[in-house]
């Protein structure tokens, strides 16, 4: 069965860097990912990543959140950093309560990842994000960056007027194929 989800407009992406730069490289990486997206012609809400250290800080950026129809949330997660994993859940809860949709939500965490959180994002019904993408394994920065850049580039290429579940699936399959061709093991799941 094909998804009936339609998100109006071409992708307009806001990258939220919630990593707090814990290992000292994440914020620079997020800015480099934004720069690569700009070079590819993607529409970004803001010219660089939005760096926040807690979900309550998102309230000050509601105009940016409302202008975006794609939201990329990047943080830390997993058993090695349980407090950071709990923070990603807090961002998720804040977005569920406050974000205006519909949006495509993509979630990626560096270091390890929290499989229960990924499942929660991928199984959520309704809410502000009828389309969602979350990693299903630990990913390196290279894996995550390549996948996300390819996914959003393909989505932008095929979504001139609006985004559909079918377009998101096609973009996901192209990005998944790229990781396999490069013999990278990171994997992402998609909910349409």
Image (cartoon, rainbow, N blue to C red):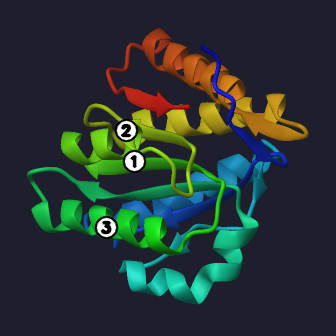
- Report the side of 37 relative to 93 (left or right): right
Q: Position of residue 83 (x, y in %)?
A: 15, 68
Q: Is residue 46 visible?
A: no
Q: Which mark is residue 108?
A: 1
- Report the side of 17 relative to 69 (left or right): left
Residue 130 versus residue 43: which sits nearer the camera? Answer: 130
Residue labelled with disc 3: 24
- Snapshot quadrant of residue 138: top left
Residue labelled with disc 2: 123
Q: Residues within 10 Å of mark 2 (few under 14, many from 20)?
A: few
Q: Secondary structure at mark 2?
A: helix
Marks 1 and 2, how far apart in space? 16 Å
Residue at position x 29%, y 39% in the image: 119
Q: Position of residue 24 (x, y in %)?
A: 31, 67
Marks 1 and 3, how far apart in space? 17 Å
Is residue 55 depicted above or below 131 in this figure? Answer: below
Q: Position of residue 52 (x, y in %)?
A: 44, 78
Marks 3 and 2, how far apart in space? 32 Å
Where is the C terminus found, in terms of image quarters?
top right
Q: Residue furthest bottom?
A: 60
């Amino acid at each position: 069965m094909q998804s009936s989800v339609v998100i109006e407009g071409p992708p307009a992406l806001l990258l939220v860097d919630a990593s707090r730069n814990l290992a000292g490289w994440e914020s620079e990486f997020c800015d480099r990912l934004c720069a690569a997206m700009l070079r590819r012609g993607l529409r970004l809400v803001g010219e660089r990543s939005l760096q926040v250290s807690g979900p309550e800080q998102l309230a000050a950026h509601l105009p940016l959140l409302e202008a975006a129809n794609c939201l990329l949330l990047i943080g830390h997660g997993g058993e090695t950093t349980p407090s950071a994993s709990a923070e990603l859940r807090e961002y998720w809860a804040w977005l569920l309560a406050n974000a205006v949709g519909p949006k495509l939500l993509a979630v990626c965490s560096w270091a390890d990842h929290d499989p229960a959180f990924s499942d929660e994002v991928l199984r959520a019904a309704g809410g502000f994000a009828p389309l969602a993408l979350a990693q299903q394994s630990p990913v390196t920065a290279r894996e995550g960056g390549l996948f996300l850049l390819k996914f959003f580039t393909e989505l932008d290429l095929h979504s001139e007027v609006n985004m559909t579940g079918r377009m998101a699936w096609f973009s996901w399959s192209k990005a998944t194929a790229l990781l396999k061709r490069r013999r990278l093991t990171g994997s992402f799941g998609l909910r349409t």
